[in-house]
Image (spheres, rainbow, N blue to C red):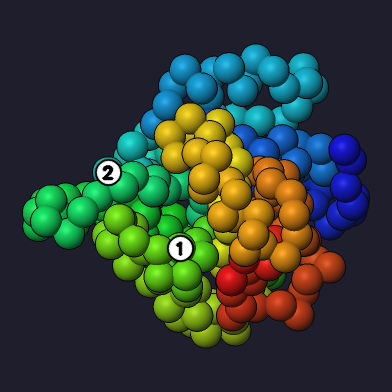
Amino acid sequence: MQGAIYPSLKDRTVLVTGGGSGIGEAIVRQFIGQGSRVGFIDIDMAASKQLLASLPADASVHFEHADLRDIGALKRAVAGVREAFGPITILVNNAGRDDRHTIEDVTPEYWDERFALNLKHQFFAAQAVAPDMSKAGGGSIVNMGSVSWVLGQGNMPCYTTAKSAVQGLTRALARDLGPNNVRVNSILPGWIMTQRQQDLWLTPEGEAELMKRQCLKRKLVPDDIARTVLFFSADDSGACTNQSYIVDGGWV
């Protein structure tokens, strides 16, 4: 279903991390529908190639294969998108993984790896594109958080801790980049029914509990998040920065 059209997104260079599948794939598709030039980074080569093959032939899209835990690889990927499409003025820090883990199983190495996967790259991606945005007279950064830490969800303490820090990172970046007209916001998705979530975590009992607690009695899908990303990226939200917006169907 076609949503709103934002004229300010046409021909803008957008970078989406974790754009090969799930919520990231929906974000890539939505920006292409706006006429944006979209670069995306992902570690999953097979999923990314499948996405590329399914896009319209005239889509302005560029894929960079990288492991975002490797900051050097991230910087090279950002440079590749810039070389393909010019200065990046919209960044969507989407990549992350909500793998379950117990307190007892967490080692110092696992803790660091989870933070590298769910938080660290967001800062360094922002650092890499901020000069582009400043020179262009402004830009928008959207960081992906999670309602998991707001809910106090268990069985993944590294993930929920990292995702809670996204709000602090968002506010810090918004304050420091605001003088250059760079806006920074975060989105906190609820339980979004990506294929991964359905394959790994969704059970009849979990779905029943979710429908009981959500105000909206329907499953949320990746496009619910992607359309919100479009709004916070477009000039229509030009006065919005330093905010964290929950998209969870009224679960929290």
Residue 24 shows up from this direction: no
Single out the mark in the foreground, 2 or 1: 1
Q: Position of residue 184 (x, y in %)?
A: 58, 71
> Which quadrant holds the C terminus?
bottom right
Assess whether mark 1 and mark 2 are in contact (beta carbons under 8 angstroms): no
- Which residue lies under the disc numbered 2? 70
Which residue is nearer to you in this view: 2 or 170?
Answer: 2
Tally of marks: 2
- Residue 164 lies, in percent from the top left, at 40, 71
229 sits left or right of 148 in the view: right
Image quarter for residue 45? top left
- Would residue 99 be found to the left or right of residue 224 on screen? left
**Residue, x 54% and y 78% (percent of image)?**
174
The quarter of the rendered structure image containing the N terminus is top right
Instruction: Give the percent coordinates (x, y) of residue 146.
Output: 50, 62
* Alpha-carbon span between mark 2 and mark 1: 26 Å
Name the kind of residue labelled 2 in the image. Asp
- Residue found 24% across the figure and 50% down from its top: 101
First in sequence: mark 2 or mark 1?
Answer: 2
Helix, strand or loop under label 1: helix
Asked whether residue 46 appears in the rendered view, the answer is yes
User: Residue 155 location in percent, x, y?
Assistant: 30, 56
Q: Which mark is residue 112?
A: none
Horizontal placement of 65 versus 109: left or right?
right
Residue neighbourhood size for the residue with mark 1, other residues' Cα within 10 Å, grouped as few (<14), some (14–19), many (≥20): many
Q: Is 143 drawn above or below residue 58 in the view shown? A: below
Q: As shown in the figure, which amino acid type bears the numbered disc 1?
A: Ser
Residue at the image position 13 percent from the left and 51 percent from the top: 105
Q: Residues within 10 Å of mark 2 (few under 14, many from 20)?
A: few
**Residue corresponding to mark 1:** 148
